Image (cartoon, helix red, strand yellow):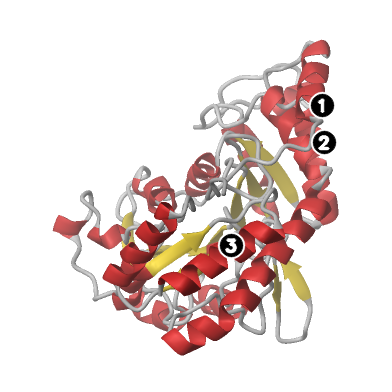
């Protein structure tokens, strides 16, 4: 039997065609034809107020930190179980990170513990929609609005996923916080190799976001004919991607619905195949709260111990199946551990030790998924 990779970038077949087209237009440096196509796509499909493509989700988060004017000493609440960029973007501006724990039923931030972490210097709450499954955004926004705090959605994994409010209205993830960041890294549902996007939902940030995006200049205003020359008007950096990245991304966006349908079918097949086994073994599978949808980004299991998790990784590897663990809790990282003085975060540490991600990509066949599941069941 052949090897089953954990991830395999899916190509629609139009990526190189659009890249060649971008080259033929003789405008490849960014903020051109394909950049605008991609941004308009998201603004139209999900009713996002304003979108700016970036070279990574990390860049989008760094833009968010600048936009909310993070200053040295400001505190930002961040889940510990996340990728380093979620915290690093704010540390670079001088923020003190206050780490929050995950829930005991999924790796998302435990919104019931956030209030106790808020202090006089708190400026923002950053939420991560792990596996594309929404945090409880209504509770988080209500808490933040009462304290006049910013909410930033790290929606790196959350394209085409939704939150349903108490009135039953479905809202796309990335549209609820003041700002949101998406990723198009090759491990995500929609890819451009590297790439990301900042979503600006708070209208007061729109003009400044463009300036920061364009290295601190009002270049975009100049090209729209709003000013007769452009210059340095604020801090910023080179956050916008080239037209080549945008062209690749647009080829993917055209197939978004097809890609999403297939990925969600794979996710559901895993759930159906493993549910009885997981219940018998007391192993946690992904849980969808009533307010959340699934976007087929990743499928994970939470084993009963670190030793069992690592043993299963080795058993799958012996059968040619690649599976991987995920984040290392940031409060226990080499960079942060010696200075961490916060509360214990047992759930974050549990996911660090016990969570295992299974192969999930567009080109997996139903036979592949059955083989992965059968190998898991037989190895136990």
Instruction: Estimate how packed mark 3 is, as few (under 14), some (14 to 19) or many (20 or more) residues with alpha carbons within 10 Å.
Output: some
Which quarter of the picture shows residue 57? Answer: top right
CA–CA distance between discs 3 and 1?
44 Å
* Residue 224 screen position, x and y as percent: 81, 26
Q: Nearer the viewer, residue 284 or 175?
A: 284
Instruction: Estimate how packed mark 2 is, as few (under 14), some (14 to 19) or many (20 or more) residues with alpha carbons within 10 Å.
Output: some
* Residue 75 screen position, x and y as percent: 35, 61
Q: Nearer the viewer, residue 166 or 358?
A: 358
| Disc 2 versus disc 3: nearer the observer | 3
Residue 33's disc number: 1
Q: Are marks 2 and 1 in contact (CB under 8 Å)?
A: yes
Q: Regarding mark 3 in the picture, which secondary structure is present there? A: helix
Above-or-below relation of 277 to 47: below
- The residue depicted at 78 percent of the width and 83 percent of the height is 168
Residue furthest to the front: 1
* Residue 88 screen position, x and y as percent: 37, 47
For disc 3, the marked residue is 371
Above-or-below relation of 360 to 105: above
Residue 188's disc number: none
For disc 2, the marked residue is 37
Q: Are marks 3 and 1 in contact (CB under 8 Å)?
A: no
CA–CA distance between discs 2 and 3?
40 Å
């Amino acid at each position: 039997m052949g090897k089953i990779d954990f991830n395999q970038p899916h190509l629609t077949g139009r990526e190189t065609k659009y890249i060649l087209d971008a080259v033929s237009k003789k405008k490849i440096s960014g903020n051109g034809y394909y950049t605008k196509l991609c941004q308009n796509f998201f603004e139209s499909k999900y009713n996002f107020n304003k979108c700016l493509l970036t070279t990574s989700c990390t860049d989008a988060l760094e833009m968010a930190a600048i936009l909310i004017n993070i200053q040295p000493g400001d505190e930002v609440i961040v889940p510990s179980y996340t990728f380093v960029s979620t915290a690093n973007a704010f540390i670079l501006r001088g923020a003190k990170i206050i780490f929050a724990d995950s829930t005991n039923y999924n790796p998302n931030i435990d919104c019931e513990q956030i209030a106790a972490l808020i202090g006089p210097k708190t400026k923002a709450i950053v939420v991560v929609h792990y596996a594309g499954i929404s945090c409880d955004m209504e509770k988080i926004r209500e808490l933040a609005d009462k304290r006049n705090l910013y909410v930033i959605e790290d929606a790196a994994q959350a394209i085409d996923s939704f939150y349903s409010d108490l009135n039953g209205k479905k809202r796309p993830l990335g549209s609820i916080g003041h700002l949101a960041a998406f990723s198009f890294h090759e491990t995500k549902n929609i890819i451009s190799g590297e790439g990301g996007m900042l979503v600006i939902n708070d209208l007061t940030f729109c003009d400044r976001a463009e300036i920061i995006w364009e290295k601190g200049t009002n270049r975009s205003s100049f090209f729209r004919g709003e000013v007769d020359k452009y210059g340095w008007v604020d801090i910023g950096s080179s956050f916008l991607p080239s037209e080549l990245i945008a062209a690749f991304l647009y080829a993917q966006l055209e197939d978004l619905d097809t890609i999403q349908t297939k990925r969600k079918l794979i996710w559901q097949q895993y759930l159906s195949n493993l549910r009885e086994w997981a219940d018998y073994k007391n192993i946690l599978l992904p849980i969808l709260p009533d307010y959340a949808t699934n976007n087929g980004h990743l499928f994970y299991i939470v084993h009963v111990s670190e030793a069992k998790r690592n043993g299963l990784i080795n058993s799958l590897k012996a059968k040619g199946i690649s599976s991987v663990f995920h984040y290392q809790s940031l409060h226990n990282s080499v960079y942060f551990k010696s200075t961490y003085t916060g509360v214990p975060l047992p759930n974050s540490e549990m996911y660090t030790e016990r969570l295992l991600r299974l192969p999930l990509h567009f080109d997996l066949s139903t036979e592949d998924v059955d083989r992965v599941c059968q190998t898991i069941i037989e190895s136990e």
